[in-house]
Image: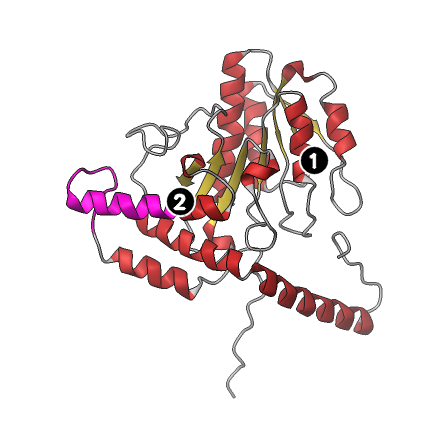
């Protein structure tokens, strides 16, 4: 007897690639060209890369020059947390404190801990409520004396319980004290409206495989006026913030996936919400002593 085909439900970990991303990426994989080269193949690769950058920027409310392509979400988080910390500390040795939450992804938590262990950073942990949400009042209290604060980093949407943070309000508070704020928005793209410019953030991390793009490619959205020390040195690609030959096919696949994810977000979210509610109703009706994690709604 054959077993039924498995049902894949772990989209919070990674999503299947969208057909549009597969087709766009496959078309580019059959070509050759380094986007830094000056000959025809290189210029064609550069055009594809910059068109992808423009697409991602438009969809996420950013300027093309603010989109730094990376090898994924973990690199984007590390580049933002370490790079902004180093830039701020280099500008003033007293800027060593990082304000964050205990519910961040490990790409942020471990980067922060590394800075504590190796760079003398200090951490202020913002408390979260029973739903895992941060109170803007607690951030304001943590910034009461901002003279030693290097940066604030708070995720946009939690990858385990789905809690959505009040990012625009938090970023506005950080801006009052002239402190840059980063957000890991990796779980938000395609599920929530995300506008980098309107958010007030200084930096924001994105990963393609969370919204139907390929693994191994992401982006750090970084405001032009936010200093960030690079972690990779070499050819000076990506505004000299992230050296290395760009993955043109990956960027093309990411842009195609982002286009579909944003265009279908409203209908897709409604479908997922309906399925979620049916699942919760069924579980609560069949199993005793069940706790539902995350904020209601």
Residue 36 on the magenta span: yes
Residue of label 2: 54
Q: Name the foreground residue: 169 vs 285.
A: 169
Give, as a single range, the part of the protein colored magenta.
Answer: 32-52
Residue appearing at x 55%, y 25% in the figure: 115
Q: Is residue 103 above or below residue 31?
A: above
Q: Is residue 114 left or right of residue 273?
A: left
Q: Tag 2, which secondary structure?
A: helix
Residue 79 on the magenta span: no
Residue of label 1: 169
Q: Name the foreground residue: 261 vs 213.
A: 261
Question: In the rendering, at what x and y percent does residue 34 appear?
Answer: 23, 42
Residue appearing at x 54%, y 30% in the figure: 81
Instruction: Mark 1 or mark 2: name the one nearer the start of the chain.
Output: 2
Please identify the quadrant where the C terminus is shown.
bottom right
Q: Is residue 20 left or right of residue 43?
A: right
Q: Is residue 225 left or right of residue 184?
A: left
User: Residue extending furthest right?
Assistant: 289
Residue appearing at x 55%, y 11% in the figure: 92
Q: Is residue 156 above or below residue 275?
A: above
Question: In the rendering, at what x and y percent does residue 101 appear?
Answer: 68, 35
Question: In the rendering, at what x and y percent does residue 173 appear?
Answer: 69, 28
């Amino acid at each position: 007897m054959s077993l039924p085909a498995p049902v894949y439900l772990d989209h919070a970990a990674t999503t299947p690639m969208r057909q549009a991303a597969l087709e766009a990426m496959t078309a580019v994989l059959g070509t050759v060209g380094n986007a830094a080269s000056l000959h025809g193949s290189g210029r064609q690769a550069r055009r594809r890369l910059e068109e992808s950058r423009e697409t991602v920027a438009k969809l996420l409310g950013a300027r093309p020059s603010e989109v730094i392509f990376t090898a994924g979400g973990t690199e984007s988080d590390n580049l933002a947390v370490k790079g902004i910390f180093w830039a701020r500390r280099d500008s003033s040795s007293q800027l060593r404190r990082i304000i964050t939450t205990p519910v961040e992804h490990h790409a942020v938590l471990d980067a922060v801990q590394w800075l504590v262990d190796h760079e003398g950073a200090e951490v202020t942990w913002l408390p979260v409520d029973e739903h895992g949400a941060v109170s803007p009042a607690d951030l304001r209290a943590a910034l009461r004396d901002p003279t030693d604060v290097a940066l604030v980093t708070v995720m946009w949407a939690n990858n385990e319980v789905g809690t959505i943070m009040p990012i625009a309000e938090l970023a506005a508070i950080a801006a009052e004290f002239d402190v840059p704020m980063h957000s890991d928005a990796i779980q938000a793209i395609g599920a929530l409206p995300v506008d980098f410019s309107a958010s007030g953030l200084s930096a924001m991390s994105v990963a393609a495989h969370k919204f139907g793009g390929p693994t191994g490619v992401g982006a750090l959205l970084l405001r032009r006026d936010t200093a960030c020390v690079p972690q990779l040195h070499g050819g000076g690609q990506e505004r000299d913030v992230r050296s290395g030959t760009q993955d043109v096919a990956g960027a093309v696949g990411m842009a195609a996936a982002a286009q579909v994810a944003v265009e279908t977000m409203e209908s897709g979210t409604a479908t997922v919400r309906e399925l979620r509610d049916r699942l919760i109703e069924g579980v609560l009706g069949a199993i005793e002593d069940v706790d539902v994690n995350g904020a209601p709604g």
